[in-house]
Image (cartoon, helix red, strand yellow):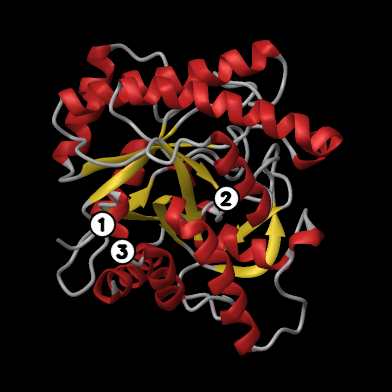
């Protein structure tokens, strides 16, 4: 069976602020933009959700979740993966922080599992994972890497046990702004220390993992130097994907122009650029193929586009989503 194609709803939230020229875009509007995308008569199959305001109240009632599920179903979509609100200031806390922080992190996963159960009960979710990260920065993590790796793994183990009770799996996103997963080596160490491959795995995002190669926030783990050749790129990409692919249980199609960007807690992270950006560094299809080898053996049933921090004017253009869908269809056909 071909991989289902999903669009992320969080580009309408990440980096958006009320009262500015880039306010949050409602879930209703993001669903509409996704539904309107079309390439040669083909459309998106579903959406992935960010479980936080204003799209989703983490403490929503069953009736609230049913209303959202009905709305998504009416748009013709299924729900795939869910982003848990694990960060300080939302529901959660740093996974290698204080005891209270770590308890809050596990609670955020439990809240997400409850919403996942409700979505399944309402018939709109049959596959996907719950996405997490460490909710702490590389600088804090570096203060004691050995101790923090142990704390991080213990928190992931506790959260993984909660997820397993609900029939869910957790995928830690490889993003350079999160301590303990800010390089491909740190990410691998965290997953191995957690030691729950059937429950806690990796979410590979093309834009974020590109910066793993260059060693942003962890120069000691760089696989490439600036000015690299194409041959050097593919050799490095193979090293990275061979190491992390066995853990990969969720996948984001994306593009990166080689720069970094961030707002708030998303400091110095991979800059997503548009799918057809002429400055894009990645062969989206070929890179995706390397992550998605034997995807069915790892329980992957869908792939999702991720493109955060675009201006609202870009997100409101139908051509933006058609270009994204076109890139997704090429990946689907290749794997």
State which quadrant residue 165 falls in.
top left
Q: Is residue 47 above or below residue 117?
A: below
Q: Is residue 53 visible?
A: no
Residue at 62%, 34% (x, y): give it.
134
For this rendering, which residue is in front, 137 or 246? 246
Left or right: where 296 falls relative to 265: left
Specify the label residue 296 is tagged with.
1
**Disc 3 to disc 1, C-alpha distance:** 5 Å
Tag 2 residue: 174
Query: SS of the residue at dot 2?
Result: loop
Image position, residue 231 (x, y; %): 61, 89
For the residues bearing labels 3 and 2, Cβ distance under 8 angstroms: no
Image position, residue 15 (x, y; %): 60, 43
Indicate which label's residue lies in the foreground, 2 or 1.
1
**Mark 2 neighbour density, 10 Å: few (under 14) some (14–19) many (20 or more):** many
The number of numbered discs placed on residues in the rendered structure image is 3
Left or right: where 157 falls relative to 224: left
**Disc 3 to disc 2, C-alpha distance:** 20 Å
Image position, residue 96 (x, y; %): 69, 26
State which quadrant residue 292 falls in.
bottom left
Q: Is residue 95 above or below residue 133?
A: above
For this rendering, which residue is in front, 247 or 320? 247
Tag 3 residue: 294
Q: Is residue 312 above or below residue 201?
A: below
Quadrant of the rendering where the C terminus is positioned: bottom left
Residue at 35%, 15% (x, y): give it.
60
Quadrant of the rendering where the N terminus is positioned: bottom left
For marks 3 and 2, the one nearer the N-term is 2
Image position, residue 19 (x, y; %): 61, 33
């Amino acid at each position: 069976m071909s991989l289902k194609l999903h669009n992320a709803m969080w580009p309408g939230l990440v980096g958006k602020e009320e009262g500015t020229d880039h306010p949050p875009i409602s879930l209703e509007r993001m669903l509409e933009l996704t539904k309107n995308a079309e390439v040669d008569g083909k459309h998106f199959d579903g959406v992935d959700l960010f479980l936080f305001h204003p799209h989703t109240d983490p403490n929503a009632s069953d009736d609230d979740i049913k209303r959202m599920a009905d709305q998504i179903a009416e748009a013709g979509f299924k729900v795939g993966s869910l982003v848990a609100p694990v960060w300080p200031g939302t529901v959660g806390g740093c996974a290698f922080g204080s005891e209270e922080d770590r308890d809050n992190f596990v609670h955020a996963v439990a809240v997400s599992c409850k919403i996942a159960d409700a979505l399944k009960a309402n018939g709109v979710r049959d596959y996907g994972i719950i996405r997490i990260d460490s909710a702490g920065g590389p600088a804090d993590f570096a203060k004691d890497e050995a101790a923090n790796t142990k704390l991080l793994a213990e928190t992931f183990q506790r959260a993984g046990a909660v997820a397993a009770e609900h029939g869910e799996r957790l995928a830690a996103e490889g993003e350079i702004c999160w301590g303990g997963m800010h390089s491909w080596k740190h990410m691998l160490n965290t997953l191995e220390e957690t030691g729950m491959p059937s429950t806690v795995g990796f979410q590979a995002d093309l834009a974020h993992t590109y910066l793993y190669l260059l060693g942003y926030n962890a120069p000691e783990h760089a696989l490439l130097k600036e000015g690299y050749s194409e041959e050097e790129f593919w050799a490095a990409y193979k090293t990275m994907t061979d190491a992390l692919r066995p853990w990969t249980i969720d996948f984001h199609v994306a593009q990166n122009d080689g720069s970094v960007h961030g707002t708030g807690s998303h400091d110095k992270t991979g800059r997503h650029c548009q799918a057809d950006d002429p400055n894009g560094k990645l062969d989206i299809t070929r890179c995706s193929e390397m992550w998605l080898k034997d995807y069915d053996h790892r329980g992957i049933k869908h792939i999702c586009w991720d493109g955060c921090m675009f201006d609202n004017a870009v997100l409101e253009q139908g051509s933006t989503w058609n270009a994204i869908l076109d890139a997704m269809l090429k990946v689907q056909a290749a794997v």
